[in-house]
Image (tube, rainbow, N blue to C red):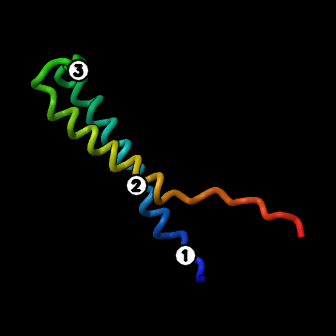
Amino acid sequence: MAAEPAFPRKIAAGFYFFLILLGLLFYVGWSLLYNTWDISRPENVGVYALTIVLLGFGITGYLLYRTPAKKAEPPQ
């Protein structure tokens, strides 16, 4: 089987890591701007929904596209 090039995997992993950062920065920025740190307020449901979607896709994609750790080869 041919070896898969690492460059596209790094681009995809970087994009998904960017989604994680974007989700966190969006939540923190919104909360700082509008001073809404209370989770129980119903008018903030959209902010939490968008944050969860960004974090969910980011974490899932990053785990799927990161470069796997190299396994130690057994001695021959």
- Sequence order check, earlier mark of 3 and 2: 3
The percent coordinates of residue 60 (x first, y second) are 40, 50
Residue at x 89%, y 70% (from the top left corner): 76
* Whether residue 29 is situated above or below residue 39 in the rendered picture: below
- Sequence order check, earlier mark of 3 and 1: 1
The percent coordinates of residue 34 (x first, y second) are 17, 22
Pointer 3: what residue?
39
Residue at x 37%, y 49% (from the top left corner): 58
Residue at x 15%, y 35% (from the top left corner): 46
The answer for how far apart the CA atoms under marks 1 and 2 are is 18 Å
Residue at x 38%, y 56% (from the top left corner): 15
Q: Is residue 55 or residue 76 the one in the foreground?
A: 76
Q: Secondary structure at mark 2?
A: helix
Label 1 sits on what residue type? Answer: Glu
Q: Secondary structure at mark 3?
A: loop
Pointer 1: what residue?
4
Label 3 sits on what residue type? Answer: Ile
Which labelled disc corresponds to residue 65? none
The percent coordinates of residue 13 (x first, y second) are 45, 57
The quarter in which the N terminus is drawn is: bottom right
The answer for how far apart the CA atoms under marks 3 and 2 are is 26 Å
- Badge 2 crowding class, 10 Å Cα cut-off, few under 14, some 14 to 19, many 20 or more, is some
Label 2 sits on what residue type? Answer: Gly
The picture quadrant where one finds residue 40 is: top left
Q: Secondary structure at mark 1?
A: loop
Pointer 2: what residue?
61
Query: Which residue occupies the extreme right position in the image?
Result: 76
